[in-house]
C-alpha cells in the first residue's frame, strides 16, 4: 500500500523520537521513481543545512552492489567468467591461499563473501570498528590496493565452504574491473553506471555537497574528520537519495540501462545457500523474506554515516534510508527500514508461534557446543564470541552465546516454527526493533556434524 509524504514524515518523526540521529533521509520507490521522501534533521549543524533529496551521504558498503553491477556488465560482455579463477583477471596483486590444497578463488566466491578472505586483516583494525582501518585522513595520499596489501591478499579458508563478510573481496572485485576494463574504477562507474542512470550527484570522490558525519558523544554531536576509503570497491561511493532512487528503480525494473533483466534475476537469486530453509546470498545482495515476499538488501556503515537499501522485487517497491550522526545506527536503521517495508507490503511482523508443540525427543541431537565459523578477527566474533551452546533450561530448549554481551550470554528460547520440521525454530530479538529470527539446524553433506544457520544474519556455527 502506498505511503504518501505526510505519512512518511510522521513515520520518520517516530523514528527520530526513538533514535538519536543528526540527519535522516528516508524514501520509498515504486513505479520507476521516488514515490515519497522525507528528510529530517541537518546535513550540517554549523550552517544549519537541512537534509533534502539532494543531500550527499556516504553509502559505505552499499557500494558493493555497484561493484557487483560492474562485474556483471563485464560478464554480459563475455570479458569474465564468474566461475573462473580470479588469477585469470587480477593483475595488481595476488590472492595467496593459506594451504596448498585450497581450490582457486572465483569471482562468484568474491561476490558472495565465500572466498575465504577475512574481514579484518590486522588486529589493530578491531580498534576502529566503523572503518576497520581501511580509511586515510583527507588530504593524504590513498594507497593503491597493491600497496595496501603488500602485493598479496591471504585466503584463510577453503573457498566456497563458508560465508565471511569482507570488504577486501569487493575491493578485489573493483580492482578486477579496472584490470579487465583498463579504466580507473571511478571513471568506469561514472560512464557505465552513474551516467546511464542519470545519477549526477554520485561519485567516488568527496564533494562540497557531502553531509557532515558526526559522532554522538556525551556533550553532543562532534564532526568526524574527513577521510577517504582505501577499499574503494567495498565502500567508497557517495550518493544522494534522489540518485539512489534512480538506481534501485532500475534494479526493480529489470536493470534499466545498466543490466539485462536476466542478469538482475541472477544477481538476486540464491548463489550461496548452505541450507534451503534460509534465504542465502545473492551476488552482493543479502536475501530475506517479509510476510512471504522475497527481499534483497544491503546496508552501509562508515564513521559518521549509515545507509540501507531494501527491495521487494516481485512487489516492485523499495525503501531507502540514509543517516549522518546516528547513535548505533548500524543496529537500528535496517530494522526500521524493514518495518516501513512491511507497511508498504501490508504484512505483519513475524512472531513466535504458540500453536506448535515442543518436541523434546529431538533435543538430545541438538544440544551441545557449536563453534562460530568466523575468523578470530571478524568483528561479529567480538559480539557473539567463539561459540554458542544449545541447552535445556527450565524445561525449554535455549540457545546462548559465549559472548561478552549479557543478553546474548543469557540466551533465547527456541520456539518451534514449522509443524513438519522439528529442526526449525524462531527466537525473539527485542532489541533495536529486530523482532524475531529463524534458527535452523542442518547437517551439511559429508561433514558428519550438525550446523546452525540464522536467517536474520549470515552467521553459521558447527558442532564440536
Image: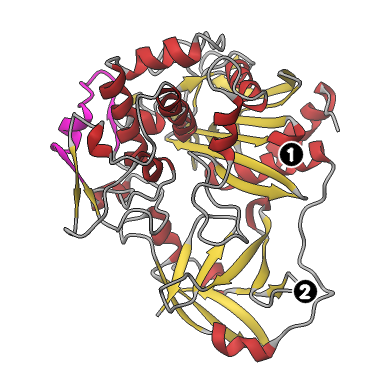
Q: Which residues, given as a range, are shown in magenta?
A: 134-153
315 or 345: nearer the viewer = 315
Query: Residue 419 bears which disc, if any?
Result: 2
Q: State the residue position of label 1.
A: 341
Kind of element beneath mark 2: loop
Quarter of the image for the N terminus: give it. top right
Q: Quadrant of residue 22?
A: top right
Q: Is residue 24 magenta?
A: no
| Residue in the image at 19% along x and 56% along y | 98
- Note whether 78 is above or below 13 in the view shown: above
Q: Residues within 10 Å of mark 2 (few under 14, many from 20)?
A: few
| Residue in the image at 65% along x and 46% along y | 335
| Residue in the image at 24% along x and 34% along y | 88
| Residue in the image at 34% along x and 19% along y | 185
How many numbered marks appear?
Answer: 2
260 or 400: nearer the viewer = 260
Amino acid at each position: 500500500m502506498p505511503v504518501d509524504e505526510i505519512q512518511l514524515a510522521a513515520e520518520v518523526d517516530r523514528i527520530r523520537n526513538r533514535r538519536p540521529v543528526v540527519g535522516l533521509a528516508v524514501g520509498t520507490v515504486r513505479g520507476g521513481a521516488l514515490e515519497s521522501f522525507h528528510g529530517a534533521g541537518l546535513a550540517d549543524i554549523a550552517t544549519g543545512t537541512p537534509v533534502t533529496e539532494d543531500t550527499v551521504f556516504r553509502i559505505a558498503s552499499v557500494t558493493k552492489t555497484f561493484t557487483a553491477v560492474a562485474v556483471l556488465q563485464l560478464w554480459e560482455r563475455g570479458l569474465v567468467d564468474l566461475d573462473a579463477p580470479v588469477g585469470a583477471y587480477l593483475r595488481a596483486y595476488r590472492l595467496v591461499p593459506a594451504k596448498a590444497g585450497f581450490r582457486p578463488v572465483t569471482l562468484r566466491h568474491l561476490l558472495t563473501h565465500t572466498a575465504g578472505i577475512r574481514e579484518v586483516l590486522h588486529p589493530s583494525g578491531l580498534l576502529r570498528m566503523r572503518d576497520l582501518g581501511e580509511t586515510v585522513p583527507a588530504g593524504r595520499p590513498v594507497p593503491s590496493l597493491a600497496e595496501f596489501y603488500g602485493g598479496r591478499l591471504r585466503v584463510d579458508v577453503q573457498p566456497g565452504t563458508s560465508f565471511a563478510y569482507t570488504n577486501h573481496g569487493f575491493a578485489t572485485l573493483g580492482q578486477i574491473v579496472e584490470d579487465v576494463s583498463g579504466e580507473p574504477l571511478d571513471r568506469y562507474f561514472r560512464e557505465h553506471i552513474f551516467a546511464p542512470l542519470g545519477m549526477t550527484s554520485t561519485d567516488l570522490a568527496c564533494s562540497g555537497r557531502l553531509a557532515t558525519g558526526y559522532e554522538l558523544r556525551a556533550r553532543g554531536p562532534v564532526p568526524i574528520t574527513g577521510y577517504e576509503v582505501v577499499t574503494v570497491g567495498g565502500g567508497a561511493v557517495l550518493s544522494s537519495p534522489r540518485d539512489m532512487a534512480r538506481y534501485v528503480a532500475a534494479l526493480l525494473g529489470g536493470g534499466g540501462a545498466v543490466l539485462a533483466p536476466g542478469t538482475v534475476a541472477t544477481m538476486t537469486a540464491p548463489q550461496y545457500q548452505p541450507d534451503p530453509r534460509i534465504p542465502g546470498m545473492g551476488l552482493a545482495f543479502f536475501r530475506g523474506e517479509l510476510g512471504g515476499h522475497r527481499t534483497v538488501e544491503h546496508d552501509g556503515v562508515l564513521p559518521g554515516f549509515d545507509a540501507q537499501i531494501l527491495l521487494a522485487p516481485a512487489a516492485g517497491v523499495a525503501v531507502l534510508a540514509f543517516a549522518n550522526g546516528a547513535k548505533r545506527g548500524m543496529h537500528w536503521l535496517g530494522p526500521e527500514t524493514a518495518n516501513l517495508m512491511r507497511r508498504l507490503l501490508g504484512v505483519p511482523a513475524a512472531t513466535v508461534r504458540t500453536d506448535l508443540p515442543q518436541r523434546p525427543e529431538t533435543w538430545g541431537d541438538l544440544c551441545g557446543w557449536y563453534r562460530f565459523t568466523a575468523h578470530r578477527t571478524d568483528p561479529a566474533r567480538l559480539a557473539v564470541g567463539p561459540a554458542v551452546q544449545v541447552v535445556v533450561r527450565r524445561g525449554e530448549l535455549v540457545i546462548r552465546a559465549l559472548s561478552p554481551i549479557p543478553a546474548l550470554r543469557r540466551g533465547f528460547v527456541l520456539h518451534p516454527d514449522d509443524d513438519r520440521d522439528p529442526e526449525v525454530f524462531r527466537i525473539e530479538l527485542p532489541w533495536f526493533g529486530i523482532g524475531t529470527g529463524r534458527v535452523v539446524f542442518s547437517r551439511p553433506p559429508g561433514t558428519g556434524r550438525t550446523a546452525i544457520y540464522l536467517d536474520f544474519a549470515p552467521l553459521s556455527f558447527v558442532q564440536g
